[in-house]
Each structure stands twice: as C-alpha cells, then as structure tokens.
Image: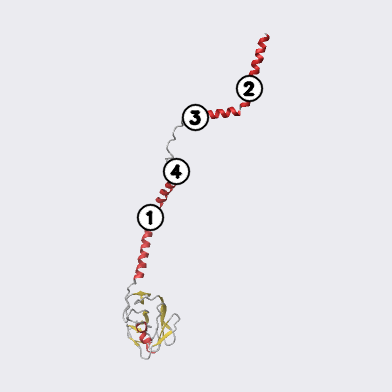
Amino acid sequence: MTTDGVNTGLSPPVITELLPNPSSPQTDAADEFIELYNPNSDAFDLSGYKLQTGTTYTHDYTFPAGSILPPFAYVAYRSSVTKLSLSNTGSKARLQNPAGQTLSEVPQYTNALDGQAWALFADTWQWTTTPTPNDENILETPPAATAKAAAGKSAASKSSTGKSTKGATTKKPATKSAATKKTASTTAGGSDEDPTAAPSPVHPLVLAGVAGSALAYAGYEYRKDFLNRLYQLRRYLRTRRLGRAKL
C-alpha cells in the first residue's frame, strides 16, 4: 500500500504488458508501450512516479503532475510519449514511486518477435501474439511455443509405449545373432550346409588306405625288431638241422 499523499491506502499499480517490437506499419519509436493496471476502486495519482527500462534501467520517464490512472483501468503508455526504448533482444521494465521504491517489476524477456507482447497472466509472464493495449490481456500462444509443447507431448506419448517398443527391440538382436552364427559356420566349413545334419558314411577304400598306412608305419618303426626275430628264427632252424644230422 502506498503512503504518498493522495494515494494513501491504495495498492500500487501493476505493469501488465510490454510491446517491444510492434508489427509494421507501427514503429518502435511511436508504438512500443508499457501498460499499467490500477487494481483500486479509486483513481491513482502517478505524478512524480517513474517508468524505467533497459537491462540495467538506463532509460526512465517521469510522469508529469496531474497524471491520473483511473480505477480498475488498463492504460498503455506509448514510446511516442515516454520516449522509452524496449530492445528487441532483451530488456526489463519497472515502476518506482517518487521515493525511489520499486512497486512493480517485469522479468527480463529475450528475442521479441514482430507483434508479440510480453504479458502477465496469473502471475506468469509469457509471450502472446495478441497485444491488448488499454485492455485486459489475451493469451494467444505463439506457433513456436505450441510446436514445442506438442513435441513434449509426443515425447511423453513415446515414453508411455516403451514396453512394446522394448519387446520389439529385444527380439531383433536374437535374429541378428542367428544370422551371424550361420555366417560363421559357412566361413569355417566352406559351405552353408546344416551343421546338425548326420555325417555321410566313410568309403571302404578310404578305410583300407588308412589301415595300410598304419601297417606300413608300424613296419618301418619296428623293422629292427622284426629283422632280429627273423635272424633268431633262422639260427634256431639251422641249429636244429645240425642236431638232427648228428643223430
């Protein structure tokens, strides 16, 4: 509540809307505005009050004597009168009483697009495509913000179906693994025949060849023993013949 003269017992005005980047044919020099709302049932005397703009509040406008804000009224103060600048890339605004106390302050905005107003809706500042100077604010969400909200909803919907997606993903690697296994079998064996099929019978000639090779190898390895046995046998037979001759 203010205590400066005629405004004693009244709630301070509230900044409710900024238009930093008016659409053509409007211009920044004439049609940018800062809107104030008087929440009281009595008029509010703005004489000596200040509007300030800029990220560090380097621009200000002092209301002249006799500046009255009607009860429950929205009033837009345009740049053609205040000479205040609202940068398109980012700025802030505030209202101060003659003692330098801040009564209302707007959070900094960024990237003001053509014709969009930075406005207050239920204690929240946001962009609207419908500026309403000298009237109650109307929220019309910019297309970019709508698309962002839709993207968020789509992501949430995708997340909610995660179970079925996960099931399909789990099944796919199993198929890939079987294909990889078959390829490895083909590379190692030189063919793509089924490794579980029964082996074909071995030809008898192959078996005979293997047996003959085994016998030849054994004969070579044990040739000395064989020759020694043969010599002993021949010696035995000769001794026996000699024995018979003597009889």
Q: Nearer the viewer, residue 181 or 18?
A: 181
Q: Earlier in the sequence, mark 2 or mark 3?
A: 3
Examine the image and state in which quarter residue 84 appears.
bottom left
* Residue type at numbered disc 2: Arg
At x 65%, y 20%, the residue is 232
**Separation of residues labelled 2 and 4 (CA atoms):** 54 Å
At x 64%, y 21%, the residue is 231
* Residue type at numbered disc 4: Thr
Tell me the residue that label 4 is attached to.
186
Label pair 1/3, CB-CB below 8 angstroms: no
Q: Earlier in the sequence, mark 1 or mark 3?
A: 1
What is the x, y in percent for residue 26?
33, 81
In the picture, the disc for residue 165 is 1
Of circles 1 and 3, which is in front? 3
Q: Earlier in the sequence, mark 1 or mark 2?
A: 1
Label pair 3/4, CB-CB below 8 angstroms: no
**Separation of residues labelled 1 and 3 (CA atoms):** 58 Å
What is the x, y in percent for residue 96?
42, 84
At x 61%, y 26%, the residue is 223
SS of the residue under disc 2? helix
SS of the residue under disc 4? helix
Label pair 1/2, CB-CB below 8 angstroms: no
Horizontal side of 26 relative to 234 (left or right) equals: left
Tell me the residue that label 3 is attached to.
207
